[in-house]
Image: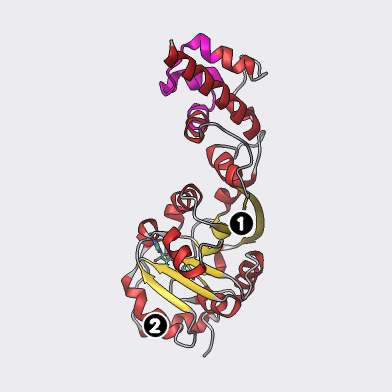
Amino acid sequence: MEKLSNPQKTIETIKKYQFNFQKKFGQNFLIDEHVIQKIINGAQVTKDDFVLEIGPGIGTMTQYLAEAAREVAAVEIDKKLIPILGETLSEYDNVTIINEDILKVDIGALALERNAGKPIKVVANLPYYITTPIIMGLFESHVPIDNITVMVQKEVADRMKVGPGSKDYGALSLAVQYYAKPYLVANVPANCFIPRPNVDSAVIRLTRHESPAVEVEDETLMFNMIRASFNQRRKTLQNGLKNSGLFPVSKEEIIEVIKEAGLPETVRGEALTLEQFARLSNLMNKKINNNKKK
Ligand code: SAM
């Protein structure tokens, strides 16, 4: 069968099923074989792998994944695409389609059942409206994952990989880098999709660390401190932490924590590395626990 990466085949399939693109589902289908090959190579998919694909669309990338991997499970929310996938993937006996919202799927159970609990690979041309919840959900749920290789908005890929000193640095950079090592696989122009998205895209691979990049006593506390610091980007770290009202300590105690971490009182959150946020949150944790004992 002619592959869907041939734009004519995609157009023909869409017409045959009278499929209407749904903006609310972020539907932009790939029509460039070269880009798909880059994604598969970037994800380092082998015949040993179980791959979870999020949002297969009409199955364009799924056809290549089925050939490269041992097994593929593809989760698609739009029920109108299910009969199309039945036809476009009919030649492959190692693909399962799950008609569900990815945010509601128990991926841990899927990995256990299909891959004996061994790390899986996640590959996707993501629906951009839920990029962050999907990626953070995968990391925070502690599903065994080898790597996540995904097409995202170029701007989001930039945010994931930068450090302090860049305007793109923020809570997403720190959250991603806590769990994984980011690597930019490719930049992808809008004309590689049908319909064309309004933004530039990029493929990023996030290789999961065996254990998080830094040691923290209370992850939630650290991420609350990170969010509080970046919520008020122009403010100093001490004002950001104080104004959030999230931490049961006095203003003086916040200053003590900042100084104990070896930082200047006037420092801004955007200047801090992940290691510095970890140290800061461990000191804050100690302070909060001491206050509880008083
Ligand atoms: N993989 C296809 C390709 O590259 O041509 C389609 C990619 S398109 C950018 C995103 C896909 O994700 C669409 O098929 C859309 O219906 C699906 N989708 C959107 N929201 C979803 C969700 N919450 N759960 C699962 N799939 C979703």
Residue corresponding to mark 1: 204
Q: Is residue 40 above or below residue 166?
A: below
What are the residue bounds of the magenta stretch?
226-254
Magenta highlight on residue 13: no
**Which quarter of the picture shows residue 38?**
bottom right
Between marks 1 and 2, how big is the CA–CA gap?
29 Å
**Which quarter of the picture shows residue 15?**
bottom left
Crowd band around label 2 with a 10 angstrom C-alpha radius: few (<14), some (14–19), many (20+):
some
Write the residue at 66% across / 69% down.
Answer: 41
Write the residue at 42% across / 16% down.
Answer: 292
Q: Nearer the viewer, residue 129 or 250?
A: 250
Task: Please provide percent x and percent y for residue 66.
Answer: 54, 78
Identify which amino acid the numbered label 2 is placed on.
Answer: Gly
Task: Please provide percent x and percent y for residue 58.
Answer: 44, 76
Task: Please provide percent x and percent y for residue 246.
Answer: 42, 24
Residue corresponding to mark 2: 86
Q: Is residue 39 above or below residue 285?
A: below
Identify which amino acid the numbered label 1 is placed on.
Answer: Ile
The C terminus, quarter of image = top left
* Figure quarter occupied by ligand 1: bottom left
Left or right, 108 with respect to 152, comes to: left
Q: Nearer the viewer, residue 57 or 45?
A: 45
